[in-house]
Image: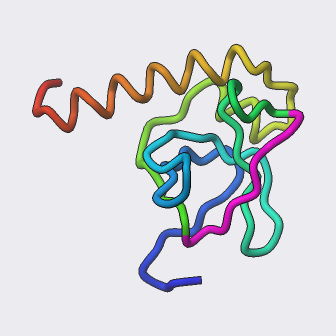
């Protein structure tokens, strides 16, 4: 792994930087060496996460959310919870990129 990139762990929010899903937000629902298990609750539900190499995603800095807390504690996370939280996070990122708060 690149020493300049931050470590990506369970419950982190990431943006895909390559592939068909480039630009999409995902939650990390598992890790396996250099691969991450990514879910967004829609195309990639928690039961069938996408495998993607760490070098093909970028970590998003954010505050802790209820979904992230559930993932860290090992509680069951519903796909609907993932979709709602990712939609909220996407709106926040869009506002920050446009200079609004």
Residue sitting nearer the eye, 73 or 16: 16
Q: Eyeballing the image, is 6 above or below 83?
A: below
Relative side of 20 to 5, left or right: right
Q: Percent x, y for residue 59?
A: 48, 56
Residue 92 position, x and y percent, is 33, 27
Say whether residue 45 is left or right of residue 74: left
Span of residues in magenta: 47-55
Residue located 51% across and 53% down the image: 16
- Vertical placement of residue 61 versus 77, above or below: below
Figure label count: 0
Residue ID at (42%, 81%): 4
- Name the quarter where the N terminus is drawn: bottom right
- Is 60 part of what is drawn in magenta? no
Residue 72 x %, y %: 75, 41
- Residue at left 27%, top 30%? 94
Q: Is residue 38 above or below residue 57?
A: above
Quarter of the rendering occupied by the C terminus: top left
Left or right: residue 57 versus residue 23 is right
For the view shown, which residue lies furthest in the front direction? 20
- Asked if residue 60 is positioned above or below residue 44 in the image, the reply reads below
**x and y percentages locating residue 48 in the rendered image:** 86, 39
Residue 52 belongs to the span the image colors magenta = yes
Specify the farthest residue to the left.
99
Q: How is the image coloured?
A: rainbow
Residue depicted at 70% across the width and 14% down the height: 80
């Amino acid at each position: 792994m690149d020493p300049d990139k931050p470590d990506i762990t369970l419950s982190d929010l990431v943006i895909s930087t390559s592939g068909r899903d480039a630009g999409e937000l995902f939650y990390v629902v598992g890790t396996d060496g250099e691969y991450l298990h990514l879910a967004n609750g829609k195309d990639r539900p928690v039961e069938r996460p996408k495998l993607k190499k760490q070098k093909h995603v970028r970590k998003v800095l954010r505050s802790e959310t209820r979904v992230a807390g559930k993932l860290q504690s090992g509680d069951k996370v519903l796909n609907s919870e993932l979709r709602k939280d990712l939609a909220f996070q996407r709106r926040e990122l869009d506002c920050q990129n446009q200079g609004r708060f």
